[in-house]
Amino acid sequence: MLFRDSTPTACGLGQAAMGPFYCPADSKVYLDLSFFDELAQRFRAPGQFAQAYVVAHEIGHHVQNLLGISEKAHQMRARMSRRDGNALSVRVELQADCFAGVWAFHANRQRGGTMIDAHDVEQALTAATAIGDDRLQRQTQGTVVPDSFTHGTSAQRVRWFRVGLDSGELGRCDTFRAQLL
Ligand SMILES: [Zn+2]
């Protein structure tokens, strides 16, 4: 779903300030178009592949939903302290980044390796860096972006996107077992 300003969803009112998000209750990805303007201007990550990375990350959450990972994480989080719950959320989010990389690997291969070049990857990594929790919290004082509080640092997001992009294997995206994120 594409929207501006706000839109009703099965997960409550979707608002532009939330950034792109996935709603498991209706299995839809909600993309506020002003986020992409912001991505290009404020975060300096223009380019279609940077946008595709953001969309692919959200679709990654849909894959997690289909695989039962979201439900399991949700149940575990209910029994955890807030701090542990946030740490678990980071693993969920980094896995979505890794899945986005896996998508990019295969989409690129299907097109004979012509879809993305080094510059595109650079742009996507810039996007991943720009929307890391640490960077966002430093930059967006006052702006609420709930889907970003628990996504991991810029370096972690870049690393896991790369793991997916370089391998093309979902199995490499086990962020739950990884000792070092
Ligand atoms: Zn996410």
Image (cartoon, rainbow, N blue to C red):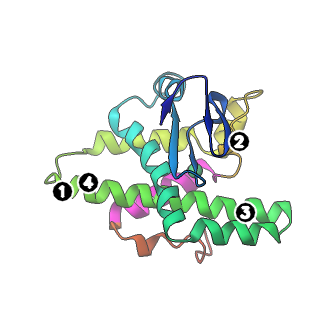
Determine which residue is flagged by label 4: 107
Which residue is at the front of the view, 27 or 51? 27
Q: Which residue lies furthest to the right in this view?
A: 81
Q: Is residue 181 visible in the rendered structure shown here?
A: no
Image height check: is 137 above or below 153? above
* Residue at the (66%, 37%) spot, across then down: 136
Which sits earlier in the primary sequence, circle 1 or circle 2?
A: 1
Which amino acid, by three-letter code, is at mark 4?
Ala
Q: Where is residue 96 in the image (x, y as percent from the top left)?
A: 51, 58
What number of labels is visible?
4
Q: Is mark 4 within 8 Å of ligand 1?
A: no
Name the secondary structure under disc 2.
helix
For label 1, the crowd category at 10 Å Cα-Cα, with few meaning under 14, some 14 to 19 and many 20 or more, is few
Q: Residue 69 lies in magenta, yes or no?
A: no
Are the residues flagged by discs 4 and 1 in contact, CB closer than 8 Å? yes
Which sits earlier in the primary sequence, circle 4 or circle 3?
A: 3
Quadrant position of residue 121: top left
Which amino acid, by three-letter code, is at mark 1?
Gln
* Residue at the (62%, 75%) spot, across then down: 179
Q: Is mark 1 within 8 Å of ligand 1?
A: no
Determine which residue is flagged by label 2: 146
The quadrant of the picture occupied by the C terminus is: bottom right
User: Which residues are the magenta region?
Assistant: 151-166
Which sits earlier in the primary sequence, circle 4 or circle 2?
A: 4
Determine which residue is flagged by label 3: 87
**How much space separates mark 3 and mark 2, taking CA atoms?**
15 Å
136 left or right of 42? right
Determine which residue is flagged by label 1: 110
